[in-house]
Amino acid sequence: MTALSLLGLGPMGAPVATNLARRLGGLTVWNRTPGKAGAVTALGAREAATLADAAADVVLTVLPDLPQVETVLHGPDGLLAGWRRRGVRTPTLVVHGTVSPVAVRGFAARLRREHGVRVVDAPMSGGVPHAERGTLSLMVGGDPADVEVLAPVFAAIATTIVHLGPVGAGQLAKACNQVVVAGTIAALSEALCLAEGYGLPRADLLSALAGGLAGSAVLDQKRDRWLREDFTGGGSARNQLEDLAFAREAEEAVDAPSALTALLHDQFRRMVTGGDGELDHSGLLRTVRAGS
């Protein structure tokens, strides 16, 4: 395996790095805020002092959006400078964060043309529990040869790996994924409010739904949150809102149906503007119940 590094040790990046260190070894990590690499360095990973120091042949970014990826590229201690110093002529940059399908295509074309950097987009689905277990779903876009080189890396963190087409295809699939996730959360939130109005036991209702056609991975993962009404941590409503904005952008670009996405975007916008943006997206129940 060629030299590998990972940038971003947040809620998803940290467990991904842990699995890479355990299963592949030879990993370098970097995080903007120091002090988060202890667990993964204990497994043998090396913490880079600068971004240039993390400029490996393959660099995985687990960062919120493309502006953050742009930030790690430039400057005297950025990735581009590091690749030049090391003589890495055609590095591979993997974008694991959820970003605009439209914007990532232009980003990849520019990096390839101006710097020889090969970009693969591989957004993740499954949340922190699957990241910890190494059982994520990866939706991949990129040149087939580049994706083939990344096969052992992806196999160390995911059990479902689907190459959907050129750069941007992974992000487009993630946009589709996020419409389904948001729609399921919204439907379950409304169903819980309906049951509440008639005094149905919430735990019994969720058990009944889980055992039938309404069962889903969303219900399985979020069930305890709805039972306890504990929405701290997890995948934030703010991120869900951003993902839905990407979906709307992609829909508008090809004049695809967008009525449901627009409705979901409005619901999560109300959740965020109502002060619940940092809560787990299953906390939409609060917004639906309030009717605000």
Image (cartoon, helix red, strand yellow):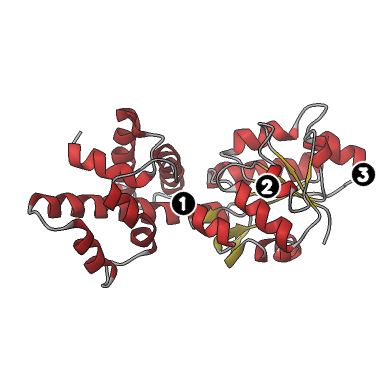
- Residue 51's tag is none
Type of amino acid under label 3: Gly
Taking the view exactly as shown, the residue that stands out farthest to the left is 198
Question: Would you say 258 lies left or right of 147 here?
Answer: left
Q: Is residue 203 above or below residue 72?
A: below
- Mark 1 to mark 2 CA distance (whole Å): 32 Å
- Secondary element under disc 2, as helix, strand or loop, is helix
Question: Would you say 29 lies left or right of 97 here?
Answer: right
Quarter holding residue 22:
bottom right
Type of amino acid under label 1: Ala
Question: Would you say 277 lies left or right of 211 here?
Answer: right
Question: Would you say 99 lies left or right of 205 here?
Answer: right
Which residue is label 1 attached to?
A: 175
Residue 185 placement (x, y as % from top left)? 31, 52
Q: Is residue 138 visible?
A: no
Which residue is label 2 attached to?
A: 39
For the point 44% across and 50% down, the residue is 254
Label 1 or label 3, whichever comes before in sequence order? 3
Quadrant in the picture for the N terminus: bottom right
Residue 63 placement (x, y as % from top left)? 61, 41
**For mark 3, does the 10 Å Cα neighbourhood hold few (<14), some (14 to 19), or many (20 or more) residues?**
few
Of labels 3 and 2, the one closer to you: 2
- Secondary element under disc 1, as helix, strand or loop, is helix
Type of amino acid under label 2: Ala
Which residue is label 3 attached to?
A: 87
- Secondary element under disc 3, as helix, strand or loop, is loop
Q: Nearer the viewer, residue 252 or 45?
A: 45
Of labels 1 and 2, the one closer to you: 2
